[in-house]
């Protein structure tokens, strides 16, 4: 059963320098209970895609296309209608809980709010449910912690509160935008394992956004690789990681830390920086950083090619990219 369908989504931001094309011609689907990963560097459109799905785009944003949740176009909904959907049918775990949680309210009050708003629970019922939720996400002594303010909790505990808040109304879709930002490795693993366990128990669909290919590989079934606001490669997780077709995907994989590199070893990098969304290249957005780029890449948008069932790649030089290995391209 298809829960979410995004068709030709475009998000433009009006800036002092002109319109910035933050998301371009985005298409994706999400089935009930499916896990989808969105990967790419900062500035590639991942978080803007998440905000568009949630109806939380900034005021200077304009949109085109459609976002269908169970057949209903969210882009046509009023703010009042979106408020009945956010937190209830779709929920989001934001990157930094310290800035996402309200510093002047206790964590208990914040977890109780969606329960009272969407589930119409009494104050006493919401209080008891909040304690159960905090306990479920691994907050120690939830009966006491429920009275704490965000600054009184550690980073990992604050993120667990965010997860409890997002799960409070058992949404159909959970969007996790870099949920382990600023956490140490041990806590990162705990948070990701917690999200996976809760998603499986609730039968929710998950959209996991990350710049870390390892996180995406271990926690998702489908992957879309974004660059310059558009999807350059998409497919099943197995297809993406076994074939590594697009030069950008290969570059991301080559840049991953590797065991045995040693202290003097240098990590592989992709030369250059992400393009300015106000002045995108005429052709392929990856042209200036791609070792395979030719004149056609600079002047003509690349075609979208099918490499297999549901495996699509946006590239002029597929044969060369398939033949090349990531280490050969980026060393």
Image (cartoon, rainbow, N blue to C red):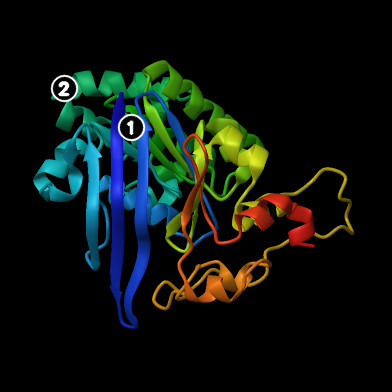
Q: Return the x and y of residue 24 as percentages of the image width and height.
A: 36, 60
Name the residue that disc number 1 marks.
173
Contact (Cβ within 8 Å) of mark 2 with mark 1 = no
> For the residues marked 2 and 1, what is the alpha-carbon distance in whole angstroms?
22 Å
Q: Which one is nearer the viewer's eye here, 265 or 68?
A: 68
The vertical placement of 191 against 184, above or below, is above
Q: Secondary structure at mark 1?
A: strand
Looking at the rendered structure, which numbered label has been put on residue 121? 2
Front one among 96 and 290: 290
Asked whether residue 194 is in view, the answer is yes
Residue under the point 73% across and 54% down: 324
Q: Is residue 36 left or right of residue 185?
A: left
Residue 208, label in figure: none
Residue 58, image x, y percentages? 26, 62
Q: Position of residue 235 (x, y in %)?
A: 51, 39
- Residue appearing at x 29%, y 30% in the figure: 3
Note whether 106 is above or below 291 in the view shown: above
Give the quadrant of residue 190: top right
Quadrant (top left/top right/bottom left/bottom right) for the C terminus: bottom right
Q: Is residue 312 left or right of residue 259?
A: left
Residue name at image x 44 percent, y 19 percent? 200
Image quarter for residue 301? bottom left
At 35% from the left and 72% from the top, the residue drawn is: 20
First along the sequence among labels 2 and 1: 2
Tell me if residue 105 can be seen: no
Above or below, 207 relative to 125: below
Furthest toward the bottom, the residue is 17
> x%, y% of residue 39?
52, 48
The local crowd at label 1, few if under 14, some if 14 to 19, many if 20 or more residues have their Cα within 10 Å, is many
Label 2: element kind: loop
């Amino acid at each position: 059963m298809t829960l979410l369908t995004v068709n030709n989504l475009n998000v433009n931001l009006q800036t002092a320098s002109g319109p910035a094309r933050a998301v371009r011609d985005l298409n994706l689907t999400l089935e009930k209970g499916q896990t989808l990963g969105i990967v790419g560097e900062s500035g590639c459109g991942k978080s803007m895609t998440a905000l568009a799905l949630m109806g939380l785009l900034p005021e200077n944003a304009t949109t085109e296309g459609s976002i269908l949740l169970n057949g209903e176009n969210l882009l046509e909904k009023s703010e009042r209608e979106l408020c009945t959907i956010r937190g209830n049918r779709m929920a989001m775990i934001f990157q930094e809980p310290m800035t996402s949680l309200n510093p002047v309210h206790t964590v208990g009050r914040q977890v109780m709010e969606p329960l009272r708003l969407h589930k119409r629970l009494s104050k006493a019922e919401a209080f008891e449910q909040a304690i159960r939720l905090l306990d479920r996400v691994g907050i120690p002594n939830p009966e006491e912690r429920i009275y704490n303010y965000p600054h009184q909790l550690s980073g990992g505990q604050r993120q667990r509160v965010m997860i409890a808040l997002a799960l409070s109304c058992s949404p159909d879709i959970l969007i996790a935008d870099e949920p382990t930002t600023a956490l140490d490795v041990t806590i990162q693993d705990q948070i990701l394992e917690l999200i996976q366990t809760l998603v499986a128990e609730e039968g929710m669909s998950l959209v996991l956004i990350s710049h870390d290919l390892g996180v995406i590989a271990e926690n998702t079934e489908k992957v879309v690789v974004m660059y310059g606001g558009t999807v350059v490669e998409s497919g099943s997780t197995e297809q993406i990681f076994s074939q590594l077709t697009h030069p950008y995907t290969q570059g991301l994989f080559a840049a991953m830390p590797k065991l045995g590199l040693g202290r003097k070893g240098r990590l592989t990098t992709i030369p250059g920086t992400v393009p300015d969304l106000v002045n995108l290249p005429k052709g392929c957005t990856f042209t200036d950083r791609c070792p395979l780029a030719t004149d056609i890449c600079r002047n003509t948008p690349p075609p979208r090619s099918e490499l297999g069932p549901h495996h699509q790649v946006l590239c002029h030089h597929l044969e060369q990219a398939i033949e090349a290995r990531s280490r050969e391209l980026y060393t």
